[in-house]
Image: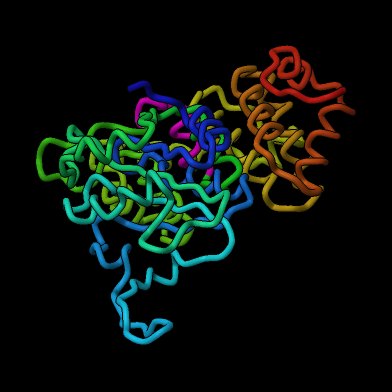
Amino acid sequence: MLSLDPQELHGLLLSLPAERTPFIWGPPGIGKSAIVRDSALALGLPCVTLLGTQIAPEDLIGVPRIRAIEGGGAATEFCPPRAILRSEPYLLFIDELNSAVADVQKAFYSLILDRRLGDYVLPAGSRVVGAGNRIEDRALVRPMATALSNRMIHVGLETSAEAWLAWAARAGVHPLVVAFVRARPDRLVEPPPVDATPAYPTPRAWHMLSDAVKTVRASLWPAVAAGSVGDRAGAEWSAFAKRAAEAPSLEDLAEGRAPVPRDPELLYFLGASAITRLGAGRAEDGTLAAKAVVALAKVSREVAVWCVDAALSGGLTGPAPQAFEAHLRTDGAQVLVDVLRLGRYAREG
């Protein structure tokens, strides 16, 4: 079994024939569910999620009821759940499939191979995607019968800091989290602890920390960080966040009222802050971000190129991203030329 990065997996989910079912293997918290949902959106299909650990066989096959039949007499028919019983095509995501008990796994046989549950047939064009953890992830995993596994195309999902950072730029992840992962990509994901430690770094855990940082007061950040990504990574992030307080504001940096810091961690934080501004929606925020990136380029071309590439290839739309690019083109910023020359951002013109 080969592993794909998030972009490759997304492409696979979009291009597989609708009647073939992929099964995605990977550790908890690396974004399997998010990729499936994004793929459903790209395909124009609603995404219905079932958790293998939270359903019983009758939740799929349906509960029986007695129905009168023509000519007299009665027959038993099974009524599938309303979430599945649809007339238009959709994507059915079966998460934690290999964590389900054997009887539930058996209930999926005809669904995965024939797109059928009893008398109900999924609408033409519907897709089914399965996912689950591996035994080495120390998650709840049960043996998968060969009759079930042989009905699916198995691929692994590997983590990619570059892909996660590109997603984080679009998703509005807090600059302190984006900057830290950019500076320490080795901390994005780590194997589950061998002891009973409940928290450890995963893309999902960093996203949780980002959400918490936006609402929790700064004095509680160390506790939230340790509780989200673990003691070690949490302590490192907390120290990084404390250092970031020393960074100048983007306004002072853009207008030349403050020098560009030399500390790489502060440079990453300022770069991430500039990218975040592009989600604000105002044209002046885009211009400010562009001026800040041009200033950063005087000290670190690497950080500036990352900012421009993340901003232009992140799929952001609206006045702010447009003003960002317009200022870089009007200003003749070399950093934009570098990104276009490297081919990391494909665009006409």
- The quadrant the C terminus occupies is top right
Residue extending furthest toward the top: 341
Residue at (40% x, 30% y) in the render: 159
Q: Is 257 positioned to the left or the right of 348 in the image? A: left
> In the image, is residue 84 above or below residue 286?
below
* Residue 131, position as x, y percentages in the image: 35, 43
Please state which of residues 319 and 27 is positioned toward the viewer in this rendering.
27
Residue at (84% x, 24% y) in the render: 348
- The quadrant the N terminus occupies is top left
Q: Is residue 235 visible?
A: no
How is the model colour-coded? Answer: rainbow
Mostly what secondary structure, the magenta segment? helix
* Residue 334, position as x, y percentages in the image: 78, 17
Is 252 part of what is drawn in magenta? no
Residue at (55% x, 48% y) in the render: 40
Residue extending furthest toward the front: 71
Please state which of residues 110 and 340 is positioned toward the viewer in this rendering.
110
* Residue 18, position as x, y percentages in the image: 53, 41
Q: Is 44 positioned to the left or the right of 68 in the image? A: right
Please state which of residues 180 and 85 is positioned toward the viewer in this rendering.
85
> In the image, is residue 47 above or below residue 68?
above
Residue extending furthest toward the right: 330
How many numbered marks have been drawn onto this rendered protein structure?
0
* Residue 186, position as x, y percentages in the image: 36, 25
Range covered by the magenta-colored residues: 175-187
Q: Is residue 98 visible?
A: yes
Residue at (42% x, 47% y) in the render: 33
Residue extending furthest toward the left: 195
> In the image, is residue 338 above or below residue 39?
above
